Image (cartoon, rainbow, N blue to C red):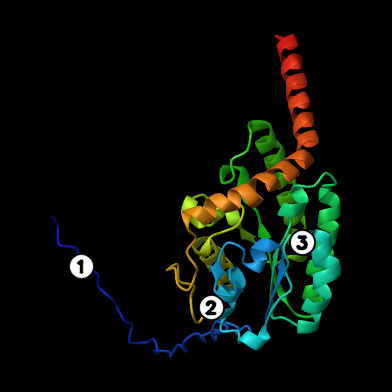
Amino acid sequence: MADRRIVTVVSENVTPTTIDPLPIEPTTAPAAPRRARTLAVLGDSTAVGLGDRIPGGWRGVGPFVAEALGVDADRYLNTSFTGARMRCVRDEQLPAALDHRPDVALVIVGMNDTLRSDFAPAVLAERLDDVVGALRAVGATVVPLRFHDHGKVFRLPRPLYRALKSRIDELNEAIDLVVARHGVPCLDLATVPGTYELPAWSVDRLHPSEFGHRLLARGFTDVLAEAGFAVPEPVTLERSGGVATSTLEHVGWLLVKGVPWLWRRGRDLVPHAASIMLRSAAETAIERGRR
């Protein structure tokens, strides 16, 4: 192969010129993570901490998130109570949360609404919109919770399962609407690793266990980290400080609380389940008639 060489010819008549280097654009350093000084938790029994029993009461997701964010105990507020619905959060819990002026507010509510005969997604969206809008107005970063398919955890007869799932889907659509309107972060429980595993749930299969509350807290802090908040003490999934529940307590709960709860809530869902079954039967009949 021929030897090819590149030869540079410099003319003696050309005066060399000096080329100034292009100016370097200054780079902006990424903003440091923001520290959350105050935290508020609003919602229902999951927000209360049911399922994660400690000596003297309940613990749960709120304290885990507060500890992870480095929020002092006197700057942490939990307004939630068992049985709360969206209306309760707006009318009864929101005023105290606004007075607290939280940097971060977690909103865990909606499942109790899906179990009532007056379930109305548009009304839930309106009430949640009021809550999120008011909290944002005082400077809070609001993180609502989007729900999982709870029928995969709490086993129900097929018609009731379909009725509950359809309502959870509608609830999530209402939450999505508010999240999009305000541009706030949101935790989708269905995407949290471990959500559908039995260790994540307490004996009632309605509330997270200690492990489940830790999973939930880790999910919230991951979302907050993406939103620019510092998480100096990441949530550990190692169980610590909770009170173990015995087999006898399991059976006792099912007899005293679990079965009566299923009976009461089942009666609320039955009309909706019946309408789903009738609609499905009608659609099947129409489809067969076309064949």
Q: Position of residue 152 (x, y in %)?
A: 57, 43
The vertical placement of 48 against 269, above or below, is: below
Quarter where residue 105 is shown: bottom right
Dot in front, 2 or 1: 2
The vertical placement of 20 against 168, above or below, is: below
What is the count of numbered marks?
3
Q: Report, in whole angstroms, how far the alpha carbon at label 3 lies from the one at label 1.
A: 83 Å
Residue 24 or residue 55, whichever sits in front: 55
Amino acid type assigned to the residue bearing label 3 in the image? Ala
Amino acid type assigned to the residue bearing label 1 in the image? Arg
Q: Position of residue 46 (x, y in %)?
A: 65, 62
Q: Earlier in the sequence, mark 2 or mark 1?
A: 1
Quarter where residue 208 is shown: bottom right
Residue identifier under label 2: 68
What's the residue at 77%, 52% (across, down)? 113
Residue identifier under label 3: 84
Q: Quadrant of the N terminus?
A: bottom left
Q: Earlier in the sequence, mark 3 or mark 1?
A: 1
- Indicate which disc residue 175 carries: none
Residue 70 or residue 140, whichever sits in front: 70
Dot in front, 3 or 1: 3
